[in-house]
Amino acid sequence: MATMTGTPVIILKEGTERTRGKDAQRNNIMAGRAVADAVRTALGPRGMDKLLVDSIGDVVITNDGATILDEIEVQHPAAKMLVQVAKTQDDDVGDGTTTAVVIAGELLKRAEALIDKKIHPTIIVKGYKKASDEAEKILERIAEPVDINNDDELMKIARTALNSKAVGGARDHFAKIAVDACKSIREDDRTVDIDLASIIQKQGKALTDTEFIKGVVIDKEVVHPRMPLKVVNAKIALLNAALEIKKTEFDAKIRISDPTTVQAFIDEEHSMLKEMVTKVKEAGANVLICQKGIDDLTQHYLAQENILAVRRVKKSDMEKLAKSTGGRIISTIEELGPEDIGTAGLVSEKKIGDEKLLYIEECPTPKAVSIVIRGGSKYVTDEAERAIHDGLCVVRDVIQDGRAVAGGGAPEIELAIRLREYSERISGREQLAIEAFADSLEIIPKTLAENGGLDSIDILAQLKEGHKTDRNPRIGVDVLAGKTGDLKDLGVIEPLGVKIQAIRSASEAAELILRIDDVIASKELKGEGGMPPGAGGMPPGAGGMPPGMGGMGGMPPMM
């Protein structure tokens, strides 16, 4: 509301909340820190899991940062920016989501202290931007090359990502699956599309019974009981057409005066269907995978020819089958020829529990693979799928980039030390912001130590001593042993891209939140039968967001 010559002028919709200046900044910072605190205890190999229950009672048990923030349904608009950071981190590099959010929360905390010292947020943002750019350059310098043809090196990177996941003794098994899968689907230009690694969950058995299939597993069963359920040295036809007689698209009447004419129609239909099966046989196929329907009579003829067939297979599965078997997807049966046929060492129907799956495996050069995750319950297989996804992502990242850094908080400590040295070359108040950025990075080794039950002050002192005296950028927190050590020698390695993206995302999110000094939130008034916020004796925050934009999905503003 503005006032002109004594007359109030209303410019905002009734019920709109507005928070300005330091109040807005503090509320936004508080919300961001609350988000970071929500995931902080999940960081590292000794991090704890979160049990999340949604509005309809579905349960998720995880320590994956992106999943936690997605499930808790954050309400505060500034807090949603950190949720987006986690999502971006997950989509881009697949790991480091918790790291990115925790660093962003600490950057906001340090910025609040600077604001209290009368340093303008624009100055802080400028200093953070310089520190972030310098941090990327430092990471590039301390990164070490990785031999992407060395399975042991790739296994170490996969194991590091899986260390914090609830896969227990299956960690090595999952790491090997991640490495084998990425090597199979790697292209000549070193790109790896992890979408070509299908993940299927089936409850039962143990995590160590999880299978890696050099081929494709589809959730379909053989269409006819007389067809073979196992075909060795399979020749596979991939068909995107229905093996049935098309119905006419217009109304027509046929007058029949002779009963033998009816039989002629039926015989001709049978002949057409049989000709389709003959075409499949002549192409050399003994397995038919059809994207559309297969007529009952056609199934009978296929069974007579000893051809295994499945129908109504998803388009995405058909494309993976083409990449895996080397076959071509044909749109009409008339086009099918021997050159379109794919190959696989074995095609078989397997029963898992009450369901049947079709395994197309032992493909010569599969560019699409499958992973069948087993586990005692849905909660276990869900978390196992998130774990294998992270494993695939980090192996992909290092194959494509070829560089890695030590884990366990080692890069963050090195960055903190180097950034403090860098800040001495910067004049003015930006120097304080760069120092605050350096202090913020120490939250990662500190949190790793705290989550591992260690004394964070002693650990940080030892880390700084190792980095300054020994000039070893690989000294980090060995959480499992309860001490510091050379993390590369211990096999704790992370892709360079994951670290760079985590720091970049955290910095950008903090900068975006710090630049906000005015929050205008419109509230939709209730229609007939409802009451506007605050009516009927209800407090202003009831039914909506509390003053200052509230907390986080029912959580208090600070945790």
Image (cartoon, rainbow, N blue to C red):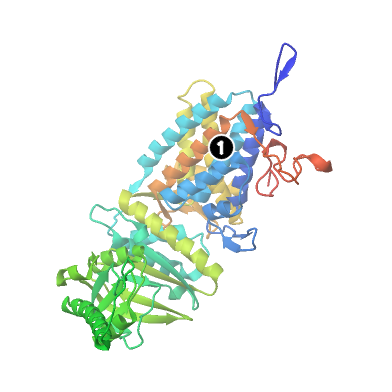
Give the quarter of the image for residue 549.
top right
* Element under disc 1: helix
* Between 117 and 236, the one nearer to me in the picture: 236
Q: Residues within 10 Å of mark 1 (few under 14, many from 20)?
A: many
Describe residue 53's horizontal placement relative to residue 428 as left or right: right
Residue farthest to the right?
537
Quadrant for the N terminus, please. Answer: top right
Furthest residue toward front: 257
In the picture as drawn, the residue positioned furthest to the top comes out as 5
Write the residue at 36% across / 40% down.
Answer: 141
Q: Residue 303's x, y, as percent?
A: 28, 86
Vertical placement of residue 481 versus 372, above or below? above
Please give left or right for residue 183 compared with residue 101 in the image: left
The answer to whether residue 166 is left or right of residue 178 is: right
Q: Which residue is mark 1?
A: 107
Residue in view at x 52 percent, y 33 percent: 511
x, y percent for residue 518: 62, 28
The residue type indicated by label 1 comes to Leu
Vertical position of residue 347 compared to residue 503: above or below: below
535 vs 296, left or right, is right
At a point 50% along the width and 37% down the height, the residue shown is: 507
Residue found at x 69% / y 49%: 554
Residue 55, placed above or below residue 410: below
